[in-house]
Image (cartoon, grey):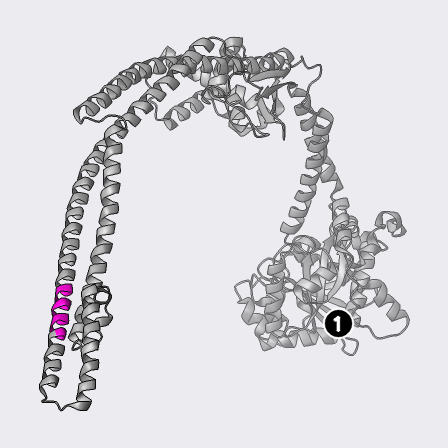
Amino acid sequence: MSGTPDILDRVRGGLPPQEPAPASEPFPLLDYLQLLWFRRRLILIITLLVGLLGYLHVNQLTSIYTARSSLMIGVQDTRPADLDTVLYQRYFGPEALEEVEVLKSRGLAEKVINRLGLLSRPEFNPVLRADDDGFDVMHWINPLNWVPQSWKDSLRGARDGELVQVPPSEAELERRRMARAVDIYLSKLGVAPVEFTDIINISFRSPDPRTAAEVANELPEVFIMDKLEAKLEATERVSEWLADQLAELEQKVRDSEQAVEMYRNEHGLTQGARGDILTEQLSSINSQLIIARAERAEAEARLAQVNRLIGAEGQGVETAGEVLSSPLIQELRSQEAGVMRRQSELAVEYGPKHPRMLQVGAELRDIRNRIGDEIQKIVTSLENELEVARTREASLGASLREAESQTGAQNREAVQLRALEREAAANRALFETFLGRFKETSSTEGTETPDARVLSRAEIPTGPSWPNRGRTFMIIVLLGFLGACALVFVLHILNPGMFSPEQVEQELGAHAIGVLPRVEGKQPPHEHVLEKANSGYVEAVNSLKIALQLSDPDARIKAIQVTSSVPEEGKTSLVLTLGIVLAKTGSRVVIVDGDLRRSSIDRKLELDSDSPGLTDYMIAGDDSGIEPYLVHDERTGVDILRTGDARYVSASDLFASRRMRQLIERLKEEYDYVLVDAPPVMAVADARVIGTIVDKTLFVVRWDKTPKKVARAALELLRKSGTDIAGVVLQQVDLKRYGRLGYGDSGYYYHYGRYGQYYS
């Protein structure tokens, strides 16, 4: 009945039919809500079932009590600050993570279990628990609990590499019980430091409030006692170690002091006397050597100057300092000057060969020779002086080297001596330090104080901390509701069928020409049409008839094929009901049973199976009329062309023959409507052949059953064969479900329960 109101309005107004305008898509959330409302019974049943199981489970949960205590670590220590840090730890940070791990250690857990005797309590020893603790819903539902415990033990033993055949010893069983108890204990323990403080909060959970308080109070005490015992053991070990070290250090001090004295006596080393003498002697020789080197350099310079002046042909030699400082040379120079003056005076009066001139010249040469001799003496004197300076320098150098050799040997001996003295001093200082530490440790042994204290003790809890039964129950119910909604969506997504004309057009690409509701009860649809002429189903068939007529207003539609993709889609019922409705309007209708392989019209109308039919007419060679092969049904008012008895005829060849085409044309001349009940498209090729000789084809899709892929493939085959498809008929629609699903024009059927009584 898709688009029926619009089509009827256009028929009354005399307007040509047209494709219905696509309705605006509703908001997806509305579709989801309508789907949930449609499946509300399933959701309600699942939610109630989950809620019931959750209620039973919540009321069977064991109440857990939590006791809390707090511990302060890093208490100020009154001991001397220089004691060994291994004995007295200080906490500078806000989080004592190491102590948190100690509190959660297995060793400390075993001490608490032993001190409180927790192995004798069923909570920590599963062996002591009763085999039947009552009916537990969740325990019964869990599949892991269906496996026998013996199988689990065997698998666990095989996984651990143990031989199942060898029974464990009593000690091994005790170890396993303790390990299991420690695991249970640690799973219930909570240790958390308070941020930016040295306080640690301790909590313990247990079904017994007294047990929770006992463990929460016992753990800090065991922790403090454990630290005191550790300190005492460390102190004893340090004292023993210090005593051994003192004996060794005392012997080392004695040996090192003896070595110093022996070395000093062996090398004749006294403290300060000889060393000071050698140092003064070395300093004096070094000073004299410096002076001698200066004097030698000065003599070399004067001699070099004189030799240089003499080498220049005696010019300027008189300017030398040694020459100038010689009285004899000065006197000879004065005499030379007087003789030269007299020579000059005589040269005026006499010639150069005059005896007086010769006498003066001889006198002048004598003076100059004497000056030269004197200068040579000065040079010789300078050379002697230089030699003396060199000899003195060499002597002082040898003395300096000897003194340095003596000083170096003494220094090496002193270095070794100082090394021995330092070793002796170090041994003595170490001995004194160890001696002081030994006295301090011995005096404080047995007086250790803990560096932690209990800040607050745990009280026996008055109420359980878990579970919050109301909240847990609400969460379970909410999860059940959400799971039911998810199941509805999954079922909807996994459903391969189609639910509305809009979905048919979207998935198949074909116009949905009609929607036929499902006939309530076991009454066949054609019987329903005969008995209830004014029912909603009949009105739906009438709407289909009108939609078929208006599908092609310009053409005269007389021959109509009805087919489907797969069997059991309701195509035969549609052929019969459509034929009955058309016959009641006064039209002459003939139904051709084209399903030669699985005919059902005879059975539905209770026809005589011995009468001839289609196959008999097709193999008949004469051109006699069709009337002998037709069966008129008085109740329905339609004529039936049965399949006939010649079933050996090939159906495809029969329908593809020219005689079949002529038969259809003849029937169209004699009848107003020729309805052909064709076999399914996907089963055989008959429908594709028949589609080429009829005017229109109705394709039947069963609501919520026919898979989209199958229907799409069948329509594609029909299109490729040239079949003129009038549209798709959605069969056996549950109008109540269809109206609540919220698809397209399903709003027309939403109040079907209210106005359905309009049809009698």
In the rendered image, residue 591, in percent from the top left (x then y), is placed at: 70, 65
Left or right, 321 with reference to 15 = left
Q: Is residue 376 magenta?
A: yes
Q: Is residue 127 visible?
A: no
**SS assignment at label 1:** loop
Q: Is residue 97 magenta?
A: no
Q: Residue at x 17, y 54 (%)?
A: 389
Picture quadrant of residue 348: bottom left
In the rendered image, residue 5, in percent from the top left (x then y), is placed at: 85, 63
Give 315 or 208, whichever is nearer the viewer.
Answer: 315
Q: Main secondary structure of the magenta part?
A: helix
Left or right, 177 with reference to 282 = right
Magenta span of residues = 367-379
Give 450 or 468, whichever is nearer the viewer.
Answer: 450
Q: Is residue 147 above or below residue 734?
A: above
Left or right, 359 with reference to 517 = left
Q: Is residue 193 above or below residue 181?
A: below
Q: Which residue is mark 1?
A: 671
In the rendered image, residue 267, in percent from the top left (x then y), is placed at: 18, 27
Q: Residue at x 53, y 13 (%)?
A: 449
